[in-house]
Amino acid sequence: MNVQYKKGVLELCVLSMLAKRDWYGYEISEYLSQKIDIADGTVYPILRKLKSDGFVTTYLSEESGGPPRKYYSLTKEGRATYQADRNDYLNFAAIVESILED
């Protein structure tokens, strides 16, 4: 798959995952790498950016019985951004699909 396609949607994919539930970084990376061919470490800069933009917050949880894990959770602003970006992307994808079908 074209690298530029992936770069354009990975942040939206992470937001989509976090809109459903809280995830920890490695879990996000593993899930996405099963669906999209991404390099190790690709997700962490996205998570840092989302946190610095105020779209996610983090907390530590020791529920796993192992060392504490840093979980990511969407903020109210993150949810609003996800909804807007999701709508924009779906509209854009529909336009591209119609062009490709012509």
Image: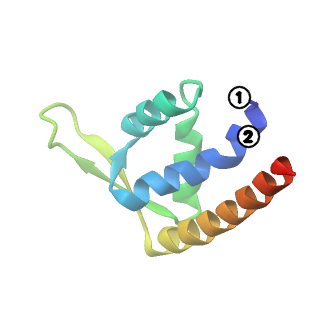
Residue, far left: 65
> In the rendered view, does 49 fall on the left or right side of 61?
right
**Quadrant, the N terminus:** top right
Specify the amino acid type for callout 2.
Tyr
Callout 2: SS: helix
Residue 22: where, in percent of width, then height? 33, 54
Q: Please tell me the numbered disc located at residue 38.
A: none
- The x and y percentages for residue 60 are 27, 49
Residue at 61%, 45% in the rendered image: 10
**What is the CA distance from the residue labelled 2 to the residue labelled 1?**
7 Å
Q: Position of residue 48 (x, y in %)?
A: 54, 48
In the image, what residue occupies the spot 46% across and 34% down?
Answer: 29
Query: Pointers 2 and 1 in contact (CB under 8 A)?
Result: yes
Residue 40 or residue 95, whichever sits in front: 95
Q: Residues within 10 Å of mark 2 (few under 14, many from 20)?
A: few
Quadrant in the rendering for residue 24:
top left
User: Which corner quadrant of the image does residue 31 belong to?
Assistant: top left
Q: Is residue 37 above or below residue 7?
A: above
Q: Nearer the viewer, residue 52 or 74?
A: 74
At x 46% / y 28%, what residue is drawn? 34
Question: Dot 1 corresponds to which residue?
Answer: 1
Along the viewing direction, whichever of 9 and 68 lies nearer the viewer: 9
In the displayed structure image, the side of residue 47 where residue 97 appears, left or right: right
Residue identified by numbered label 2: 5
Residue 47: % across, % down: 52, 48
Element assignment for label 1: loop
| Residue 82 placement: quadrant | bottom right
